[in-house]
Image (spheres, rainbow, N blue to C red):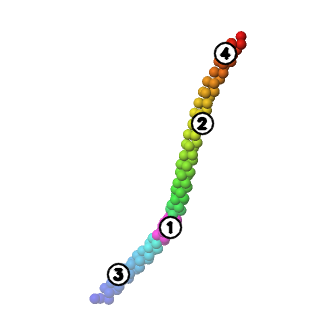
Amino acid sequence: KSLESVENEKETLQRTVDDLTQTNQDLSLEINETQSTVDEITIEMSETKSTVDELIQINETLELELDESRTIMTHESQSWEKEKNKLIKEKQVLIEERTKLKKHLRESEKTLVMVANHKT
């Protein structure tokens, strides 16, 4: 080969090395940017997981409170139902007593009228 040919080949190889070096630098930059994005996403995912964990804990607490409220409500409802039934029975007794008293009053009025008529 001639010296000129070797020089041309050397220049071509040098351009190739320069191009590859530039490509390597570009790719390194891109890799660094991508890694930075991955790191940011990882942080955001961790924060999101923490938020989800907190929400799960809040939900569990609320479920417990709801269960307690349901239990209390059921107990109170049963108590109210018993009290209602008791009051209904008391009302029936009072109605019966009122009916008896009205009947007794009518009989007393008749007796008074009969006594008054008998005296005259």
State the residue at coordinates (32%, 87%): 6
Residue 114 got which mark? Answer: 4
Kindly check if marks 2 and 3 are in contact, taking CB atoms under 8 A apart as contact: no
Dot 3 falls on a residue whose secondary structure is: helix
C-alpha span from label 4 to label 2: 36 Å
Q: In the image, what residue type sits under mark 1?
A: Ser
Report the magenta residues as a range: 36-51
Q: Is residue 101 magenta?
A: no
- Reply above or below: 101 against 80: above
State the residue at coordinates (53%, 57%): 64
Q: In the image, what residue type sits under mark 3?
A: Thr
Residue 116 got which mark? Answer: none
Task: Return the residue at label 3.
Answer: 12
Task: Return the residue at label 2.
Answer: 90
Between residue 63 and residue 72, name the one nearer to us. Answer: 72
Q: In the image, what residue type sits under mark 2?
A: Glu
C-alpha span from label 2 to label 1: 65 Å
